[in-house]
Image (cartoon, rainbow, N blue to C red):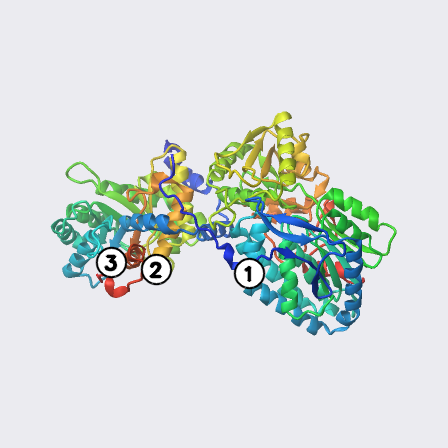
Amino acid sequence: MSPIFEYAPAPESRAVVDIAPSYGLFVDGEFREAADGRVFKTVSPSTEEVLAEVAHAGAEDVDAAVAAARRAFGPWSALPGSERAKYLFRIARIIQERSRELAVLETLDNGKPIRETRDVDLPLVAAHFFYHAGWADKLSHAGFGPDPRPLGVAGQVIPWNFPLLMLAWKIAPALACGNTVVLKPAETTPLSALFFADVCRQAGLPKGVVNILTGDGSTGAALVAHDGIDKVAFTGSTAVGKRIARTVAGTAKRLTLELGGKGANIVFDDAPIDQAVEGIVNGIYFNQGQVCCAGSRLLVQESVHDELMEALKRRLATLRVGDPLDKNTDIGAINSAEQLARITELVDSGEAEGAVRWSPACELPERGWWFAPTIFTNVTQAHRIAREEIFGPVLSVLTFRTPDEAVAKANNSQYGLSAGVWTEKGSRILAVADKLRAGVVWANTFNKFDPTSPFGGYKESGFGREGGRHGLEAYLDV
Amino acid sequence: MFADATASDTALRRFLHGLPGVDAVGLEARAATLGTRSIKTTAKAFAIDLAISMIDLTTLEGADTPGKVRALCAKGVVPDPTDRTAPKVAAICVYPDMVATARQALDAAGGRDVHVASVATAFPAGRAALSVKLADTRDAVAAGADEIDMVIDRGAFLSGRYMQVFEEIRAVKEACAREDGEDAHLKVIFENGELATYDNVRRASWLAMLAGADFIKTSTGKVAVNATPANTLVMLEAVRDFRAAGGRQVGVKPAGGIRTAKDAIKYLVLVNETLGDDWLHPDWFRFGASSLLGDLLMQRQKLTTGRYSGPDYVTVD
């Protein structure tokens, strides 16, 4: 039976953004083809439509980009901080002015709902540039000595889950501290980074300060192995992070890694239940669960397990899955066929190992890559779905009896990126947060981000911090 | 069902304080997110007509006269003289001394199915002896009120005398009995702006439902903070949980400060995504409003004709 109050389609217009049929690499302030002429296609995950052809950077292009960044480094780092700040402020304002274009572009290329790109990604991207613009002329007061110096040329490799936001996390602090960058966006989501290159031109940023190389894993590998860079910053999978750490070992390069996670969202029996349900939904279904700090493990006190599961299932039934450009869509498409296969494989293992699978009734579009929001109950610490990062809209529910048991289970993971604590008891929040080995602990909320707050991991979730005063350290010679 | 909870003052306090807390930040974020739903074309047309049919068209002024009330009644029955497809409002809401006038005017205008709601119990402050409040209520019911909007004693609630509030609601409910054996429907007004915290709003919701409220209502419209999407959401969650726990279905009425079609649609989205179909009916959800109807009609005309008219194309009360 269909509901009485059915929302009519409310699609955002895709005509607000011009997508060129093909894009070059952005090197030394100019767009150019790859030296060997290679190209690849980027597709829209919700329709499998080809959006554009993009240049594939090879070793020669990496050389050229690093050389351009090296030439730009001297003059850029010699600018007074207040001058660098002007460029960053200008970039931030242009991003705000063009945020509707960028939101549509990001939604098309990534598959995430327009509601998220419009209300979360883009405001955070602009905030990140504004925040770091403010630091550029205050570095001597950041606690790293009277005159901290930049590192040089940074090679940065970013993932596809928040293409533009991860670019902002990388580029804004690097530039504020006086470094120049060569950035490689993910193979499946190159378009917003190329749009950003145009923003840099519009802002009059000196050529070579920002270089964008599109390509696949081989481009990223060539970049991080390049002798001409001083710093590697990577956000992505733990497996690739380990390879990069091996590459960089024994060189003078600095390294920061922001890798996978298996965040524990801990709900005590005195939690604000309705808000906890929202926090759980935000924790694991936001961005289709393709979030490194997702609350993918729900640890719920046994005494409220049944009540909470009932409320959560009722809430999941109201999630709207479908066209990411529709302003009322809550859950969009999975980014790639490859990622969908990975999610499917892990979900199958969950069923095979005896966990109980549940999804609300929802119709998935025929074209594109989709996965219904899923809950696994009866999960134990031994199950693969409790240990491995799924990176999809799949929640594993475990139970605990006492605060100590909750902490022990939460920390029993190779990862340590994020955690959440839900209780109305303030002293319990402080006591539990103190014992959790996770870079971010949210209290009575989840997946909240702010440029002033450092973000990063423990254990196999990586090292180094991004954001806040701590994040500056990754781009200063201290 | 909930006999244990109301067995004594202590039991009632323990029950109300045992309800799950409300995290204000999370609650407001959820209400704001639902406020970003984009309701267009057919969905908008449906929502506008539903909202009109849910209005308790209200005048609660010291300056109210029979003439003013008759004008309001005429508008409630025929909201848009240029388009007779516009639905009637749910009720006309007045002070007790205007109930008889309103009933006559509605009947004369062909609005027998439009209810008369009367505020009572020393509205809006409620600062009077119980005997006076009950007399006020009986007076309104005798004059023909189909619905009584009572106020709770916020002073008693805030000083923790929950049983006193509970018993007062019970007494008013009894005073709602009509000679024909039916009851006037009882709406219980909390004045959320004076209860101040969302935890209090949740406790007041359960307290009123336990005492027999047919509807729970946010506010009188007479204080600075009236209905907000967030405090209404707490009440929607309460009626949902009350029914799920084996209680009756109870209606919700936000009142005060809802002036535009856009606002009203946001509330309908809250109802839709919190409670669903069962509450999307004037029997279970109402808007307490006076100026809202005008904007709904202007938006309705825009949808029908494709152009915006203006305030002069909508009748004033």
Q: Chain of mark 3?
A: B
Mark 2 — residue?
A: B223
Give the vertical position of B125 relative to A87 (above or below).
above
Q: Is residue A19 left or right of residue A260?
A: left
What separation in Å lies between label 1 and label 3 (alpha carbons)? 46 Å
At a point 67% along the width and 59% down the height, the residue shown is A468
Q: Residues within 10 Å of mark 1 (few under 14, many from 20)?
A: some
- In three-dimensional space, the C-alpha distance between marks 3 and 2, rounded to whole angstroms, equals 13 Å
Circle 1/circle 3 CB separation < 8 Å: no
**Residue B110: x and y, percent?**
14, 49
Identify the secondary structure beneath mark 1: helix
Q: Which residue is mark 3?
A: B60
Q: Residue at x 63, y 46 (%)?
A: A291
Give the percent coordinates (x, y) of residue A280.
55, 42
SS assignment at label 3: loop
Which amino acid, mark 2? Val
Q: Residues within 10 Å of mark 3 (few under 14, many from 20)?
A: some
Above or below, A116 relative to A174? above
Q: Is residue A314 left or right of residue A465?
A: left
User: Quick one: B241 or A149, which is closer to the camera?
Assistant: A149
Image quarter for residue A126?
bottom right
Give, as a three-letter code, the residue at label 1.
Answer: Ser
Name the quadrant containing residue A205: bottom right
- Give the residue displayed 22% in from the left and 52% down from the top: B92
Q: Which mark is residue A99?
A: 1
Instruction: Report if the CB atoms under discs 1 and 2 are less than 8 Å apart.
Output: no
Query: Could you tell me which secondary element the residue under label 2 belongs to?
Result: loop
Q: Position of residue B153 (x, y in %)?
A: 33, 51
- Tell me the CA gap for discs 1 and 2: 39 Å
Dot 2 falls on which chain? B
